[in-house]
Image (cartoon, rainbow, N blue to C red):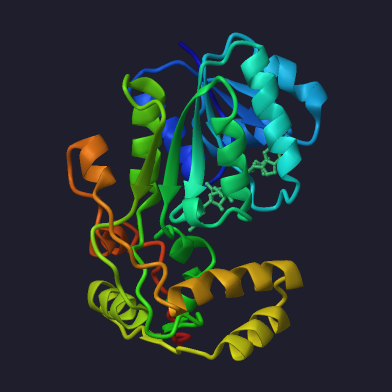
Amino acid sequence: MTVLVTGATGTVGSRVVAALTAADEPYRVAARDTARARESIDADSAVSFDFEKPETWGDALDAVDRLFLVRPPQLSRVGAITDFVDAAERVGVDHVVVLSVLGAEKNPLLPHRRIERHVEGTGLEWTFVRASFFMQNFLEEHREEVRDGVLFVPAGDGTTSFVDARDVAAVAAAALTEPDHGERAYDVTGPEALTYDEVAAVFSDVLDRPVTYANPSLPRFAWETYRRGTSLGKTLVMSGIYTTARFGLAGRVADDVRTVLGRDPIDFRTFVDDHASDFAVERSPTRSHPRN
Ligand SMILES: NC(=O)c1ccc[n+]([C@@H]2O[C@H](COP(=O)([O-])OP(=O)(O)OC[C@H]3O[C@@H](n4cnc5c(N)ncnc54)[C@H](OP(=O)(O)O)[C@@H]3O)[C@@H](O)[C@H]2O)c1
């Protein structure tokens, strides 16, 4: 049984590859740049693939039984992904695991829900992994803020049920390799919902230096983020995501990690502890005094 992993160089896909490797399950990585993919993740096999280039789909899907489907955030056209799902069904893939977002079922306009609905209408077996906000966003989007000691997101006092991408990947890998995950949607969250003040307190405690939460207004966040060089589109997407938290819609804690994996989800303190060196402040080397 071979799994095709899309988004394999990304936050979750790379961890799905690691989980499949550890479990000795056969897989193939689908990547736009196979050489870069082999370099960045420790993948056994990689094939050239682009959702926007149907001519790459045949080789990628050759002899594949199961599919891990990631919607790249930068790909706005849902049709490219749903056409690929149809191609997968035509060549005999039998199960697709879709990386989706927590609460997708309540928002029919969300691209992830549109993909889910398309998948439900095929003959494929499916599992939806509806993930909460990744803890790893602090390693990517907000690493410099943590290093500088000020978190700058417009989430107000709303809580978020942050999830470690390692748990998201572990649930996806289980759905890809174990029986009885068909026609199920899992809500994949961390064990608790935290405000950004609480997040800042965990960073301060574990890193042993002050990290605070600036709690900017939405317009101030949008203006500053755009001014710092983020594209308008990404600024708007980020504003929307943090507004969800601000309105108290991102804090739902679910039990599905425990149900699928038989263990508790990773908590935020453990995440920060595991990545403390990534958040370390680079100190300039001490200048030695010239000797006379
Ligand atoms: N961030 C969060 O907190 C969060 C929470 C829940 C759900 N999600 C959802 O998770 C998904 C993103 O997953 P992620 O964060 O693991 O990914 P990611 O780190 O954003 O990486 C995106 C991946 O998509 C690939 N890609 C980009 N354009 C492509 C194309 N045209 N054809 C094929 N592959 C392409 C990239 O590969 P190359 O660049 O190497 O080609 C990369 O592997 C999104 O749908 C997002 O909404 C995110």
Q: Eyeballing the image, is 285 above or below 32?
A: below
Residue visible at 68% across and 86% down in the picture: 223
Q: Give the side of residue 183 with respect to residue 140, left or right.
A: left
Residue visible at 52% across and 76% down in the picture: 243
Front one among 289 and 279: 279
Residue visible at 27% across and 44% down in the picture: 257
Residue 10 drawn at (x, y percent):
55, 45
Residue 286 drawn at (x, y percent):
43, 80
Front one among 171 and 292: 171
Residue most extreme to the left: 263
Q: Eyeballing the image, is 54 above or below 104?
A: above
Q: Quadrant of the N terminus?
A: top left
Residue visible at 62% across and 45% down in the picture: 114
Total marks placed = 0
Q: Give the side of residue 260 with respect to residue 129, left or right.
A: left
Q: Eyeballing the image, is 91 above or below 271?
A: above
Residue 88: image quadrant is top right
Residue 163 drawn at (x, y percent):
35, 56
Mark yes or no: residue 286 visible: yes
Q: Eyeballing the image, is 162 above or below 174?
A: below
Mark yes or no: residue 284 visible: no
Residue 219 drawn at (x, y percent):
63, 89
